[in-house]
Image: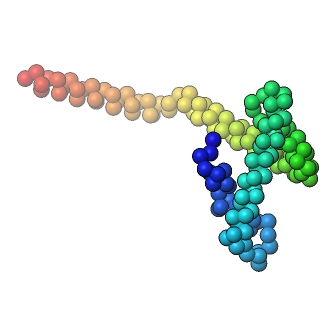
Amino acid sequence: MAEKPEDLNLPNAVISRLAKEALPENVNISKEARTAIGKAASVFVLYATSCANNFAQKQKRKTLTAPDVFEALEEMEFEQFIKPLKESLELFRKEQKGKKEAAAETKRKKSDTASEPEPESKRQKTESETKEKSKENEKNEDNEET
């Protein structure tokens, strides 16, 4: 849990960026306004989390799920956020699925190349290098004995 109430605030940089994206270019935000928006956003997140947690507890779960958040938004009378949030969640899931598939494909390609046999010329070169090293080792052993 947070040690100080300030630990629960969202980062100012995030608040500034989100506020700038939401407002027209010619609008500036004072430091006090940014702080107020940040505190309001933090309170909103804490309240939404608490409401979602209540829904999870009613179903005897410790893990919050997306449906818990949707129900919390409805209880908080923020129904207008549910549809855009569901759309964003769906996009996020598609992106994550694409990333997982790409990572699996990369891993599969790496394992395929690792299992391919070495070209004949490379194998011959490696064998000749090994013979040379063993000859050098024998010479060194002979020199050490004398």
Q: Residue at x 70, y 42 (%)?
A: 99
**Where's residue 13, x and y in %?**
65, 62
Question: In the current view of this chain or complex, which residue is farthest to the left?
Answer: 146
Total numbered badges shown on the rendered structure: 0
Of residues 3 and 103, which is closer to you in this image? 3
Where 76 sits versus 139, above or below?
below
Where 55 sits versus 13, above or below?
above
Quadrant (top left, top right, bottom left, bottom right) of the N terminus: top right
Of residues 68 and 129, which is closer to you in this image? 68
**Where's residue 76, x and y in %?**
88, 48
**Where's residue 93, x and y in %?**
78, 42
**Which quadrant of the figure has residue 14?**
bottom right
Where 137 sits versus 71, above or below?
above
Of residues 133 and 52, which is closer to you in this image? 52
Q: Residue at x 67, y 54 (%)?
A: 9
State whether residue 93 appears in this view: no
Left or right of 96 in this view: 139: left
**Which quadrant of the figure has residue 20?**
bottom right
Question: In the current view of this chain or complex, which residue is farthest to the front?
Answer: 4
Q: Residue at x 54, y 31 (%)?
A: 114
State whether residue 134 appears in this view: yes
Question: In the current view of this chain or complex, which residue is farthest to the top?
Answer: 145
Q: Residue at x 72, y 72 (%)?
A: 29
Of residues 140 and 58, which is closer to you in this image? 58
**Where's residue 88, x and y in %?**
82, 49
